[in-house]
Amino acid sequence: EAQVTQNPRYLITVTGKKLTVTCSQNMNHEYMSWYRQDPGLGLRQIYYSMNVEVTDKGDVPEGYKVSRKEKRNFPLILESPSPNQTSLYFCASSSYQGGDEQYFGPGTRLTVT
Amino acid sequence: KQEVTQIPAALSVPEGENLVLNCSFTDSAIYNLQWFRQDPGKGLTSLLLIQSSQREQTSGRLNASLDKSSGRSTLYIAASQPGDSATYLCAVDHNTDKLIFGTGTRLQVFP
């Protein structure tokens, strides 16, 4: 089954404790990205990657890092989480930059206290 | 800057009604437009994808249309059911590196 998986699905952590949210897709997609969703603000892109070793900032990259060492994986790293990073996070992938359907993971609900 | 707006923000209808959700965008230079469904606290489920060269797409009781020149898309839901209750999001693929989302229409279908 074609899918995008994220782990963990739920995470409660404390300010400053480094964490990683994993994202993996099994569709051999080149393009992957991360979004966060906040009430009243909708979905906003954090980072994206057009292929292995190619990443770029989205609209709200501050406080986040990503890496793309393998085509299937695109982890989101919060080096020093803060309460304003409490949000619902989604990973997405598609076969190329434009024109193709984007597939979304189930989401990771992160709470930073 | 591309902006996407969805109207209405919320909609409550009795079961069986046909309904239309609206999405408008400010820049017609898009690659495609995608409609998603989101259940509370859950992920996004892709419903329909309309390429910029297409006028409409259909899937079951859902029909989405696209008018690029006027910057509009509509999602038509026929014979609505309580199971259709969710938030519906439209998103445009504008400059190939991200989707730009509308703020969504929260739909409630009551029995």
Image (spheres, coloured by chain):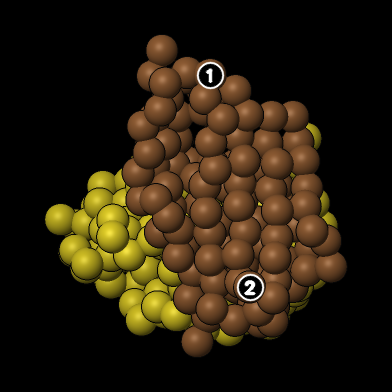
Q: Quadrant of residue B66?
A: bottom right
Quadrant containing the C terminus of chain A in the rendered view: bottom left
Q: Pinpoint residue B52: horizontal percent, then vertical percent.
A: 78, 68
Which of the pair B33/A4 is nearer the observer? B33
Q: Secondary structure at mark 2?
A: loop
Q: What residue sits 36% from the left and 50% below the top?
A: B9
Q: Is residue B31 visible?
A: yes
Chain B: drawing colour:
brown
Q: Earlier in the sequence, mark 1 or mark 2?
A: 1
Which of the pair A91/B24 is nearer the observer? B24
Q: Quadrant of residue A31?
A: bottom right
Q: What residue sits 26% from the left and 47% below the top?
A: A12
Quadrant containing the N terminus of chain A in the rendered view: top right
Q: Which residue is mark 2?
A: B70
Q: Which residue is mark 1?
A: B16
Chain identifier for the yellow-coloured part of the image: A
